Image (spheres, rainbow, N blue to C red):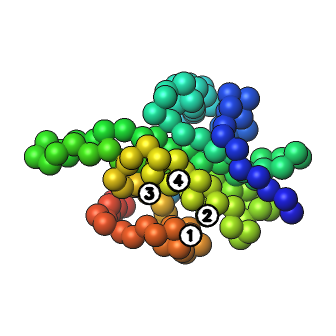
Amino acid sequence: MEISIREWDQSDLNAIQSRWLEYCRTAARSDMTLNADSENAMHRWLLDRFKRSSSIGYIAGNSQSMAGFLIGRIGEWESVPPVLEPRRIGIIDAVYVTEEFRRHGIASQLIQRAIENMRRANVVAVETIYEAWNEASAQTWHRAGFAPWMVHAYRML
């Protein structure tokens, strides 16, 4: 299975949207439902993100199909409240690999590509979020050098 990684282009947005919304439909908690305008909202968000110079996006795939994608951004962030000096960080918003291509190191390759890009852009740290109960995801991020820093806890009522 030959998979290559390339930068995203506008023609990738529909496939990203489709896969990301499918993930949202299957991975959401019981208190989360897609809104009636989710297709249009995702389309607008992806197009806006694609056009921003601070955004990064990578596609993993071959000539037949998209195996996965990564979307992130680079910028200056301040603490809230603003008591820390602003810092240049990278944020990885989404990494997705289709079921048939999982467990082949594709997510790790996408993450490494993003980190290399962010390092060249002089970021001091890279942040992401992932599902705490997804052991495969946690292992992927740990192997990439990520560790929990602040825990965002959640309680259903």
Q: Callout 3, which amino acid? A: Ile
Disc with the residue nearer the chain's start (3 vs 1): 3
Q: Callout 2, which amino acid? A: Ser
User: Which residue, given by chain and number where applicable, does mark 3 sit on?
Assistant: 129
Residue 151's image quarter? bottom left
Relative to 21, 31 lies left or right: left
Q: Do the residues labelled 1 and 2 touch (CB within 8 Å)?
A: yes
Q: Which mark is residue 140?
A: 1
Helix, strand or loop at label 4? It is: helix
Structural crowding at the residue carrying mark 1, measured as other residues with C-alpha within 10 Å and reported as few (<14), some (14–19) or many (≥20): some
Spatial CA distance of label 4 from label 1 is 17 Å
Spatial CA distance of label 3 from label 2 is 15 Å
User: Which residue, given by chain and number where applicable, does mark 2 sit on?
Assistant: 108
Q: Nearer the viewer, mark 3 or mark 1?
A: 1
Spatial CA distance of label 1 from label 2 is 6 Å
Q: Callout 4, which amino acid? A: Glu
- Tell me: residue 53, above or below residue 97: above
Helix, strand or loop at label 3? It is: loop
Closer-to-camera residue (31/146): 146
Q: Which of marks 2 and 4 is in front?
A: 4
Residue 73 is situated, as x and y percent measured from the top left of the image, at 46, 41
Q: Which of marks 4 and 1 is in front?
A: 4
Spatial CA distance of label 3 from label 1 is 12 Å
Q: Nearer the viewer, mark 3 or mark 4?
A: 4
Structural crowding at the residue carrying mark 4, measured as other residues with C-alpha within 10 Å and reported as few (<14), some (14–19) or many (≥20): few
User: Which residue, given by chain and number where applicable, does mark 4 sit on?
Assistant: 116
